[in-house]
Image (cartoon, rainbow, N blue to C red):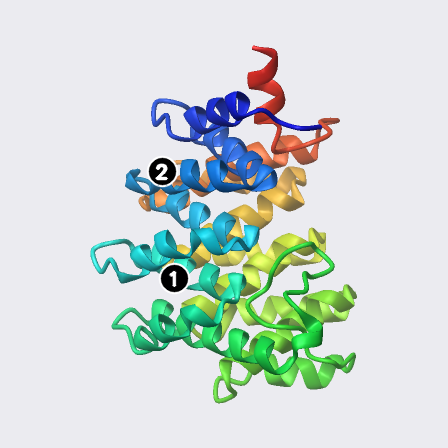
Amino acid sequence: MEISDEIILKVGEVLNDNSRPLKERFRALFTLRNIGGDTAIKLISDCFSDSSALLKHELAYCLGQMQDTRAIPILENVLKNNSENSMVRHEAAEALGAIGSESSLQILKDFSDDVAQEVAETCQLAVNRIEWLQSNSNKSNCKSLYLSVDPAPPENSQNVSQLKATLLNDNENLFNRYKAMFALRDLQTTESILALCEGLFVGSALFRHEIAFVLGQLQNSHSVPALTKCLSDLNQHEMVRHECAEALGSIASSDCTDTLKRFLNDDSRVVRESCEVALDMADYESSFDFQYANTATIVASA
């Protein structure tokens, strides 16, 4: 179905209206991501003035997943803004890596020693990804089994023991650990999932947050105890806890929703908002709704 500019603009109004519940704005954001194009990119970019670090982080994620080079200038500006939340800057860097343009290499290299570890590591990974694309031109910007553009390709191995050893080795190159991570995800076995769960408690905050993200993609109940433990650990970085919350929302079992409700008043705004959005995701997973990102249909019928 072709979506008119009028409807796209109405979806953008929902996204940029900070009086609306965050869950509605998230649905609008993912609707715009799915629509794509210059107008959608502009409407997403306009929202970076919002006060919610969680929402801005997700704006950057969606721009990266769209893989449209027209998003590069706004993402570079976000990365360069040292007053921005480091979680948002990290996601802007990851998005540049996802778009995969050689033109982004220099700015990513410039910030590869940023004072915020999560930003520096993300820039290093993004440089590795773009350089990998350059040397593997036949792979193009291939998407994963989960239709996501990942920060690294999966390692070409099905040996869980070896992949786990690489994953949990803090002395190993981070890009290689990510490759092992995505290979374990793609195996989709109980053994590989439990290996990933161990990764929630080693490595940097960036590494642990990506582990939580892939566990959310897997939507497997075997990961619920580890995700719950990680979310409940107040010493964990908020970017890790937030991703654990969203993963639990994707799994959407009753024990997951019970846990999320416990943290709706968490001291961290990022965690509070993540639990709110995660509960909306859980409602969707438990419903008969055809599509999560359904704002275009809603505004068209209004």
Place residue 151 in its image quadrant: bottom right
Question: Does label 2 or label 1 sit earlier along the sequence?
Answer: 2
Q: Answer whether residue 209 is visible to the viewer in this image.
A: yes
Q: Is residue 5 left or right of residue 195?
A: left
Q: Going 77% across and 68% down the picture, which residue do you hit?
A: 187
Q: How far from the left and from the top, in percent, is residue 258?
A: 56, 37
Element marked by disc 2: helix
Contact flag, marks 2 and 1 (Cβ < 8 Å): no
Q: Amino acid at mark 2?
A: Cys
Element marked by disc 1: helix
In this view, the residue farthest toward the left is: 83
**Where is 128 relative to 187, above or below?**
below
Quadrant in which the C terminus is drawn: top right
Residue that mark 2 sits on: 47
Which numbered disc, 2 or 1, marks the residue closer to the eye?
2
Q: How far from the left and from the top, in percent, is residue 26?
A: 49, 35
In this view, the residue farthest toward the top is: 302
Camera-side residue of 147 and 258? 147
Q: How far from the left and from the top, in percent, is residue 272?
A: 40, 40
Q: Answer whether residue 233 is visible to the viewer in this image.
A: no
> How much space separates mark 2 and mark 1, taking CA atoms?
17 Å
- Indicate which disc residue 90 carries: 1
Camera-side residue of 18 and 207? 18
Quadrant in which the N terminus is drawn: top right
Place residue 78 in its image quadrant: bottom left
**Where is 300 relative to 34, above or below?**
above
Q: Is residue 263 left or right of residue 27?
A: left
Q: Going 31% across and 73% down the picture, which residue do you hit?
A: 111
Q: How far from the left and from the top, in percent, is residue 90?
A: 38, 62
